[in-house]
Amino acid sequence: MAERGRPRRFDRAAALRQAMWLFWEHGYEGTSISDLTTAMGIKAPSLYAAFGGKDELFREAVALYRDTDGSATDRALSGEPSARAAVEAMLRGNADLHVRADRPGGCMMVLAATNCSEKNVGIRDHLAQLRRQTVAAIEARLRRAQSEAELRPDVDVSAVAAFLGTVLHGMAVEARDGASKEQLDSIVESAMTAWDALVGGPKAA
């Protein structure tokens, strides 16, 4: 049966990626509907029909970011053989992303809605919750390391995860402020030195 109605005249996936880049670069409140429609190559009615509105589009763009450009943390935590290797891969992977010349600087989940007006606190809180989930995922990986005897049972994994989350999110701000790859690498080296002190010495990867 032929599809009823007028077929969409744009590539939804490509349009969503353009929206993601725009929100990543300029933030939620710094991106207007006009900015979005121009970048996505569609009219406002098509945007609302396809995505529901700016709020829904932003949330979908954030989800796309997490699955693509922003997936370094999840890949490192799930793919490395030890907690130390996972932490280092997480930090280095994000440092690499933050300073890529073909991407906006920093991390979308950190920078896209740091400050919002009262009407957009839901967007701010949504990203804050995602950042908390990242720290929780780090903590879960450290607890797994404890259960596997990679880390001592007396290591305060909640505190270590909070520290690593602060480093991770702070690097995004530094990158947006113009930090170089070398400067971010230095931060990673310092964080790994702190890791060894916090957990009681280096472990085999």
Image (cartoon, rainbow, N blue to C red):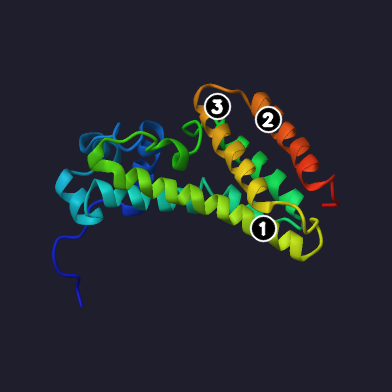
Residue 136: horizontal and vertical position, in percent?
Answer: 56, 55
Q: Nearer the viewer, residue 115 or 5?
A: 115
Residue 1: horizontal and vertical position, in percent?
Answer: 20, 78
In the rendered structure, which amino acid carries the disc numbered 3? Glu
In the rendered structure, which amino acid carries the disc numbered 1? Arg
At a point 67% along the width and 39% down the height, the residue shown is: 92
Residue 197: horizontal and vertical position, in percent?
Answer: 80, 40
Tell me if mark 3 has few (under 14), some (14-19) or many (20+) residues whose alpha carbon lies within 10 angstroms of its own.
some
- Residue 151 image-quadrant placement: bottom right
Among numbered discs 1 and 2, the one appearing first in the sequence: 1
Among numbered discs 2 and 3, the one appearing first in the sequence: 3
Q: Is residue 18 above or below residue 75?
A: above
Among numbered discs 1 and 3, the one appearing first in the sequence: 1
At a point 22% along the width and 54% down the height, the residue shown is: 52
Estimate the spatial distance between the alpha carbons at disc 1 and disc 3, rounded to whole Å.
26 Å
In the rendered structure, which amino acid carries the disc numbered 2? Ile
**Residue 41 appears in view:** no
Q: Nearer the viewer, residue 9 or 58?
A: 58
133 horizontally vs 19: left or right: right
Where is mark 3, residue-wise? 174
On residue 161, the disc is none
Q: Kindly state the secondary structure of the residue where label 1 is placed.
A: helix
At a point 38% along the width and 46% down the height, the residue shown is: 17
- Residue 18 image-quadrant placement: top left
Marks 2 and 3 close (CB-CB < 8 Å) = yes
On residue 141, the disc is 1
Estimate the spatial distance between the alpha carbons at disc 1 and disc 2, rounded to whole Å.
21 Å
Q: Is residue 9 above or below residue 44?
A: below
Tell me if mark 2 has few (under 14), some (14-19) or many (20+) residues whose alpha carbon lies within 10 angstroms of its own.
some
At a point 75% along the width and 60% down the height, the residue shown is: 146
